Amino acid sequence: MEARTALAAAAAGALALVVAPAARAPATGCADPGATADYTRAVGSALASGRDVWGEQLLAAPHGPTLAAVQRRLPPLLYARGPHGRKLTASGVYYLPFADPPGPAGTGTAQLHVADGSEVIARRASGPSLTILVGDQGRERYGSCLGRLDPAQLEGGWLPVLETGYADARGALYRQESFAARFQGRLTSLVSLSVDARSADGDVELRFSPTSGRALAVTVPRGTTRDVTLAWPPLRQVDAATYGIALKTLVREWRQRLAAGAQVSVPEPEVEDAFRALLVQDSILGWRYSIGNPYEELSFPEAPDLATVMGELGFGGVERAILAEALTRSSSGYTSWKNGERLLDSAAYYRLFRDRAYLDAATPALAGFLTSLEREFGRDGHSLLARERYSADIPDTVFGTHAQSVAWAGLRAIAGVWAETGRAALARRALALAARLEPGLRAAIRTSEVRLPDGSLFVPARLLDDETPYASLVETRLGSYWNLVMPFAFSSGLVAPGGEDAQGILRYIQLHGSRLLGLVRAGAYALYGRTAPFPVSGTDEVYGVDVARFLADNDRSDQLVLSLYGELGAAMTPGTFVAGEGASVAPLDGLAYRAMYLPPNSESNAAFLETLRVMLVHETVDASGRPFGLDLAFATPRAWLAAGKRIAVDRMPTSFGPVSFSIAVASGGASAHVHVNVPTRPPKRLEIRLRLATGETRTIDLTKKRGAVDIDVRLASR
């Protein structure tokens, strides 16, 4: 089997900006080539701007944003960092979590496969490991020469099976495949390594070296080929047939798992692969923020937010398991934010799946959260919930706009569900508290907000504390955290979609350094340190979930398209779709390839999944917060509806019941066929949009339709 291209070719357009031509020329170059001074200046200029200058350039392109255009702006993510800047793995390269399809709460353990093929780690990054050595006397770490490493890919584009290629210093070629499965009664990593030494300048040796126990060595004479299959732990060789059966079983089980959820078909393989791969990852992680590192924990408010995203994509069992776990956790710290999030997301789950058993079991805890919020209201002498911790990283006690807004939204949402299910007394209490909180919250916002000369509106995260607008949001630590927490407030429903305030907030985000390539910007202090000088900064797409909701509420289709490609091309690894809590943008330690903090991250994954969801299926609510309408295909990239192209969604859960639809443009581009299965509880407004590659846009009103609807649409000739 032949090695394909070197890792440097994974994003040749971006690396052309990063690596000096002389450094790129040798195909055998091993070290990270390093970022050039010209590239560092170009990135610094983009980061210093108050606008998303790169995103605006992509939006202005004739065909709008594309994945390739994003990838030309930045080199790929490759490295994983932990606390204090330490490498997360021996080689510094990120790992992928592999396991059998787990129960709804996620796996209890996973095998961690390092993406350069050099190592397999048991359970935690600091745990026992198996190192793979090749070459002359087995002394060369597989994947250690980046110039000879074939980029990591997943089998079939998305299955949890890692594929890499490598050429050693002797000229031998390798293809490696690995996965994890329940094997002989325990979770085991299985590895297949194919060696082609026909062009090698000498014999090569494979050496599989565990941290404990004896190593396994296999010699491959010059001029020959050999395949080796093994399992670990414990380390032993297995025959190819046994390996093949385990792989076939794993693939079948994961295909069955994903078939149970909503199905999405779009004419862009990378998007489909990312969609499926991230569902696999988040099924493995369950309620965990990450796995195998210090972030293996349930995190607020991220875990309940993730639960809703998984439910929206048809994985109600995962949503229920995450919420059930979240209900058991302490409310200490930022009490109102936590309690509001649990009320809000429990209500969302019930509306999607009408699961009375969950509601019956959860209501005692939910009622306790209501009681806690009632105690917090007015405690500090304002018509607000009491001051509480700003966030996990900011200990200041504040009237947080984000916390107050989420609590208000949660009270309204759970009141509707309790009223519908015969819990009238609880519904009245929740609705009464929301009604008392709303005027106080709106008054505090009006007192604290600032309308700027550029036409934008700044709403502070710290109400009544004289927080002033930030010229550039990542220039200070508090500005960076404003950018992370305020999307929770903006997507809560407190800001009327399409209104003057919403437009002013969107303008502030646009003009004050909130986004880069459609991604949420952040100081990325865990990567760069708190003393890194502005404009050194990165991104933190964990908080893109609620940005996507706010953009969809305000029908910002092109911005959602930009976010989708930004997430796919700059916030996760190419070919394997791994993301961290944050990612570097400015070169880190002078390196060309970029780094992530404590990947994988379930909520960063959810940002891509939610962006794709609202582009295809977006729910709207009325002034009281009740589900009102469905917008279908309102923000799809125009290239998806070029002549001969088709998009389809099947069994996507909504508050009105599952929805399915398809849009197919005829091969000549003169017509399109639209098919919609209207949900069983029809929304008060139902529309589907055709964003065509020609630039034409058609929005079709289906509000009065029922059952299966088929429409043929004649398109404008070009």
Image: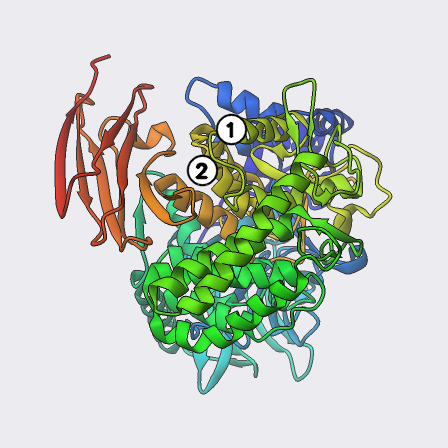
Q: Which residue lies most toward the bottom here?
A: 185
Disc 2 packing (10 Å; few <14; some 14–19; many ≥20): many
Q: Is any part of residue 399 visible from this angle?
A: yes
Q: Position of residue 471 (x, y in %)?
A: 75, 28
Quadrant position of residue 456: top right
Quadrant position of residue 455: top right
- Residue type at mark 1 is Ala
Rendered image: mark on residue 69: 1
Q: Position of residue 474 (x, y in %)?
A: 74, 37
Numbered disc 1: secondary structure: helix
Question: In the displayed structure, would residue 119 be above or below residue 648?
Answer: below
Left/right placement of residue 564 relative to residue 440 reads left
Q: Residue at x 71, y 57 (%)?
A: 386
- Residue type at mark 2 is Asp
Q: Position of residue 249 (x, y in %)?
A: 34, 73
Q: Which residue is mark 2?
A: 553
